[in-house]
Amino acid sequence: MFVANMVNVDICKATGLTYNQVMDYRIRYEKRCHGEA
């Protein structure tokens, strides 16, 4: 979980996204990786 949190922070810093936007992106990305979307 620590690594995932660090990735979220890096995404926020790199793109200026809000925390909620990052979480939404993560959910979509994880679903795509699992072939659910």
Image (tube, rainbow, N blue to C red):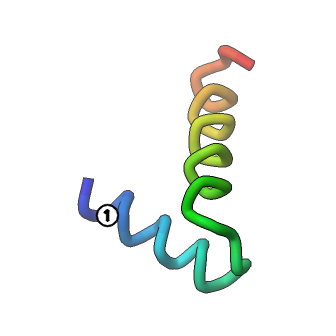
Against 8, residue 1 (above or below) is: above
**Secondary element type, mark 1:** helix
Percent of width and height locating residue 1? 26, 52
Q: Is residue 34 left or right of residue 9?
A: right
Name the residue rendered at 65%, 40% in the picture.
Answer: 29
Name the residue rendered at 64%, 44% in the picture.
Answer: 24
Pick whichever, 33 or 25, lies toward us: 25
Percent of width and height locating residue 16? 70, 80
Task: Examine the image and state in which quarter residue 15 appears.
Answer: bottom right
Near mark 1 (Cα within 10 A), the count class, few <14, some 14-19 or many ≥20, is few
Percent of width and height locating residue 32? 69, 29
Against 25, residue 16 (above or below) is: below
Name the residue rendered at 56%, 49% in the picture.
Answer: 23
Q: Is residue 15 left or right of residue 23?
A: right
Q: Is residue 19 left or right of residue 25?
A: left
Quarter of the image with the C terminus is top right
Against 10, residue 1 (above or below) is: above
Q: Residue furthest bottom?
A: 13
Pick whichever, 16 or 29, lies toward us: 16
Q: Residue furthest left?
A: 2
State the residue position of label 1: 3
Q: How many marks?
A: 1
Name the residue rendered at 47%, 74% in the picture.
Answer: 9
Task: Examine the image and state in which quarter residue 6 appears.
Answer: bottom left
Against 25, residue 5 (above or below) is: below
Give the residue type that dot 1 points to.
Val
